[in-house]
Image: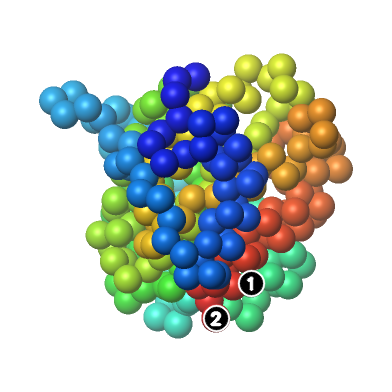
Amino acid sequence: MGSAPAGLDPAGLVSQGMRLWLTAAALAAGLALPAFAACPAPHRGLALPAEAQASRQPWPPWGVGADALTARLRQTNVSHSRLVFLGDSIIEGWQAQIYQQFYGHRAPLNLGLGGDATQGLLWRLENGHWPNGLRPELIVLMIGTNNLGYGSTPENTAAGIGAIVAKLQQLSPTSRILLLGILPRGTTTADPVRPLVEQTNRLIASCADGRRVVFANPGPLLLDGAGNLGNYVSFDTLHLTMVGYAILSTAIEPILRDTLR
């Protein structure tokens, strides 16, 4: 799995669930966080992987959803949005009552799209899914599980996520970014994608600077003590139930409260 990025606890604990709470506590107390390595990117001289290049996705339902979101955004005044969610179906499908309870009073805008991958999200940001005038205080970003599910490597997936972070900083330089680790998938720790998720999360943790970009990995909080992802938390070992969204929302709430006062 390789060594932990600079600035992370060698045992990997801070880059797991504990890092979420330590980050929130440090921010609330006004403490400086350690410096982290540069956000993942291909080595100089190498071609960008597909995951880091904007590309309209070929899956037909993705195209239908993207076009529908484009039409909706054309009719939406986004200038008052304080909080933006970006990602795939896990973001798009945030359970309605939980979403309203935690975010309804924060002028949220959900730009999640089912089936999305890093290259698809990059394409969307360049093609109408980041309207002019959208300058939220906080962007919540979670993407990459579909890349891993489609067979991408953790390194290429992380490079794609790093490209998205850089793009968002270009589009809205005053916004803070809460980068969420990819959530665990599969019923047990034996699922072959689990280590890929963990490796990707270790790589993207280096995007955090403790100021404009904060990394949090709430995924371990969705698991039981044996590392299992129960069907009361995820109905298909990937997407979340109402209980799963309640856990996720509660986990990231301290960081949201620090930013959205």
The percent position of residue 7, horizontal first and vertical second, equals 41, 41
- Which colour style is shown? rainbow
Query: Can residue 52 be seen from the camera position used here?
Result: no
- What residue lies at 32% left-to-right and 76% top-to-bottom? 133
Compared across the picture, whether 13 is left or right of 3 comes to right
Q: Secondary structure at mark 1?
A: helix
Compared across the picture, whether 148 is left or right of 175 comes to right
The answer for how far apart the CA atoms under marks 2 and 1 are is 13 Å
Task: Please state which of residues 193 and 93 is positioned toward the viewer in this rendering.
Answer: 193
For residue 55, which quarter of the picture?
top left
Query: Can residue 198 be seen from the camera position used here?
Result: yes
Q: Amino acid at mark 1?
A: Tyr
For residue 250, which quarter of the picture?
bottom right
Task: Please state which of residues 38 and 190 is positioned toward the viewer in this rendering.
Answer: 38
The percent position of residue 11, horizontal first and vertical second, equals 57, 30
Compared across the picture, whether 144 is left or right of 25 comes to left
Residue 103, numbered label: 1
Of discs 2 and 1, which sits in the foreground?
2
Q: Secondary structure at mark 2?
A: loop
- What residue lies at 44% left-to-right and 24% top-to-bottom? 3
Badges 2 and 1: C-beta atoms under 8 Å apart?
Answer: no
Q: Amino acid at mark 2?
A: Arg
Identify the mark nearer the N-term, 2 or 1.
1
Q: How many badges with numbers are in the image?
A: 2
- Tell me the residue that label 2 is attached to: 261
